[in-house]
Amino acid sequence: MSHPETTRNGTTATARRRLFIGQLAKESAVAPDTVRYYESIGLLPTPERGANGYRTYGPETVALVRFIRKAQAIGFSLADVRRIIRVRGSGRAPCDDVIKLARRQLRAVEDQLKELAAIRRLLRGCLRAWRQNADPTACASSLFCDLIEQAGSVPPRPAPQRPAFSVRPGRNRKPPSSSIPSSR
């Protein structure tokens, strides 16, 4: 088993290793602005400042940034990630919470897929009709575009459901995308 190298003052090389924001960003495969943003919303602890005023981070911050990115890649919001980090920080294993969040995310993805399928059906129908009935003179006299103005009415989208876990309602959540629900 290898042991960390000890320096003259008794600290280990690992213990004294500090990363500047650019180094952290590079090792975490994110932009420095992403690191600053995560810090500003409380996902990363406030970094130490060197004598020059520059932020310095411990090597454990690389793992935290990578964790945040992985969680986002599978669909978790930053509010979800904050919840997971807080649960872990309280000494509890967050696995039950992660499973609940993942189930909620899967339901949302399935709903989005249904909405996208409805939009695809609507667009296919519009394209069939437009290819046959496009009239440049009618479009020239319309307010915007006759093709879109003559398309079927679009029912309003239902209000999104509140997330199962929310740190601060309305914060760090993507706004709902506008889409066209299926008309059956």
Image: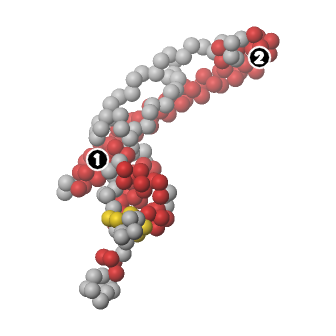
Name which quarter of the figure residue 108 lies in. top left
Q: Which of the two residues, 166 or 114, is positioned nearer the viewer here?
A: 166
Does the rendering let one see residue 94? no
The amino acid on which the numbered mark 2 sits, given as a three-letter code, is Ala
| Mark toward the viewer: 1 or 2 | 1
Alpha carbon separation for disc pair 1 and 2: 52 Å
Q: Is residue 86 left or right of residue 24?
A: left
| Position above or below: 111 against 90 | above
| Position above or below: 1 against 130 | below
- The residue at the point 54 percent across, 16 percent down is 154
- The residue at the point 70 percent across, 17 percent down is 145
The amino acid on which the numbered mark 1 sits, given as a three-letter code, is Arg
- The first of marks 1 and 2 along the sequence is 1
Disc 2: CA contacts within 10 A as few (<14), some (14-19) or many (>=20): few
- The residue at the point 46 percent across, 21 percent down is 157
Q: Is residue 31 left or right of residue 166?
A: right
Question: What x and y, as percent, mark residue 142?
Answer: 71, 11
Q: Is residue 157 left or right of residue 117?
A: left
| Residue marked by disc 2 | 134
| Residue marked by disc 1 | 83
Q: Quadrant of the N terminus?
A: bottom left
- The residue at the point 29 percent across, 89 percent down is 8
